[in-house]
Amino acid sequence: MKKIGELMKELGFNAGASDSAKEAFLKHLIKSATGQNVLTPTEKKIIADNPQKIVQFPQQLQFDFDDYNKQNDVKKKLSHKG
């Protein structure tokens, strides 16, 4: 198994880049590989230092239009058979 430094070098990443650029690159790799959003150490520190600035958004509404459209397609087919 390769070390992260070797992988970054193979992918052409600049070893002299800033720590935030390195964190962003690793965060992107994790998101691409696993689909999971992760927090970088810098982001965790910012949140820990400023918990009053964190806003909890309500859950976004989700609509499953595929099921609705399938039901309507079946209804249309049945009404035309009559």
Image (cartoon, grey):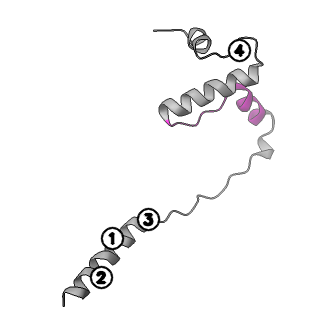
- What residue is shown with label 2? 76
Q: Which picture quadrant has residue 67?
A: bottom left
First in residue order: circle 4 vs circle 3: 4
Dot label at residue 14: 4
Q: Position of residue 12 (x, y in %)?
A: 63, 15
The label nearer to you, 3 versus 2, is 2
- What residue is shown with label 1? 70
Magenta stretch, residue numbers: 35-48
Left or right side of 48 for 60: left
- What residue is shown with label 3? 64
First in residue order: circle 2 vs circle 1: 1
Question: Looking at the image, how many numbered discs can be counted on the residues?
Answer: 4
Relative to 10, is 32 above or below? below
Q: CA distance from mark 1 to mark 3?
A: 11 Å
Dot label at residue 16: none
Residue type at mark 2? Lys
Check if mark 4's residue and mark 3's residue have beta carbons within 8 Å.
no
